[in-house]
Every structure is written in structure tokens, then in C-alpha cells.
Amino acid sequence: MIAPLRATGLADHQLAMALPLVQLTWPKTDLAAWRRFVLAIRAEGGGMLVLTEEEYVCGVMAYRRQAGPKGPVLSVPLFTVADLANRIGVVRALVDAADLLRERLGCETIEMDFDPRQSHLAARVTEAAKT
């Protein structure tokens, strides 16, 4: 049985718990750099986590609202998941959270940045966004 998932805003007390997932995408990031990044991005956006009911962090996303040529854009510079049992479920939870944020922040589109090592994840995100 796959545990239920929930998306939630990234709180200060969860930064250390999210760091191992952040390091999957940004391997050289330490806790101090991660804290600085989150503090800086909160001026324009924030972060989201996907948690299991046991509070296991299995997805992390950072976002900001930015101006685009055709209006506001939800920019996602960090999108990482790590769950072998329910990877598509975690992707779906983060994609749904990003879409809700897009609507709430009045953005027309979502732009996600992926590290080249995340090509498989990028394909999963595209697949989840279509359904």
C-alpha cells in the first residue's frame, strides 16, 4: 500500500529535513547555502514539500513569481522528488501544488528549471501535467 501524500509550505524547521533532496539536484549545497537561498526566494515566492503521513520528505520545490513578456510567470528553479515506491504520486502532488500556486499568484504559465541529470524527472513532470 502506498502512503497518502500531502503538499505543504516549506517551514524553517523543515529546511534540514529537505536538504538531502535539494542535494540530489544541487549536490554542493550545504545547509547554510540552502537557508540563504530559501530566505532570498521568500521575497518573491517560497518553497513546498511533499510529505508522507509519517512526515517523510519525498519532494521539494522552490518557486517565485516573476514578470514575463506576457504577464506574471511562476518560476520553479528547484523541483526534486525521491520516492521509489510512488515517484509519479510525488511528482503529481508537486505539479498540482505548482498549478494551485500559479492560479493563486495570478500567473499565466509555469517555467521549471531542471538539471540535465533530471531528464527522466522532467519527462515525468510533463506527463503529469498533461493528465
Image (cartoon, rainbow, N blue to C red):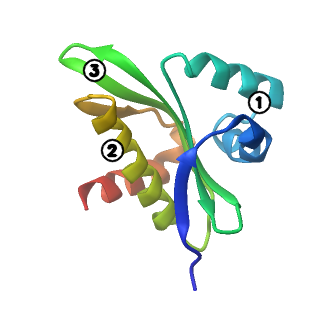
Give the tally of numbered discs: 3
Determine whether, in the image, residue 116 is placed left or right of residue 92: right
Task: Of the two numbered discs 3 and 1 on the same chain, state the one appearing first in sequence.
Answer: 1
Q: Which mark is residue 72?
A: 3
Mark 1: which secondary structure?
loop
Q: What secondary structure is marked by label 2?
A: helix
Between disc 3 and disc 1, the foreground one is 3
Quadrant holding the C terminus: bottom left
> Can you give x and y, in whole percent of width and height, for residue 49 in the image?
59, 48
Do residues under tags 3 and 1 come within 8 Å of each other at their CB atoms? no
95 with respect to 54 (left or right): left
Q: Quadrant of residue 39?
A: top right
Q: What residue is rendered at 53% in x and 60% in y?
A: 6
Estimate the x, y position of residue 119 in percent, counting from the top left: 47, 47
Which quadrant is home to the N terminus? bottom right
Q: Residue at x 56, y 79 (%)?
A: 2
Q: Which mark is residue 45?
A: none
Name the residue nearer the viewer: 78 or 53: 53
Residue type indicated by callout 1: Lys
Amino acid of disc 2 = Asp
Which residue is denoted by mark 1 in the rendering?
Answer: 28
Point out residue 84 in the picture as x, y percentages from the top left corner: 62, 69
* Distance from the alpha carbon under mark 3 to that under mark 2: 14 Å
Amino acid type shown at disc 3: Pro
Residue matched to label 2: 99
Q: Kindly state the secondary structure of the residue where label 3 is placed.
A: strand
Residue drawn at x 74%, y 25% is 35
Marks 3 and 1, how far apart at CA: 31 Å
The image shows residue 105, relative to residue 2, as above or below, that is above
CA distance separating discs 1 and 2:
29 Å
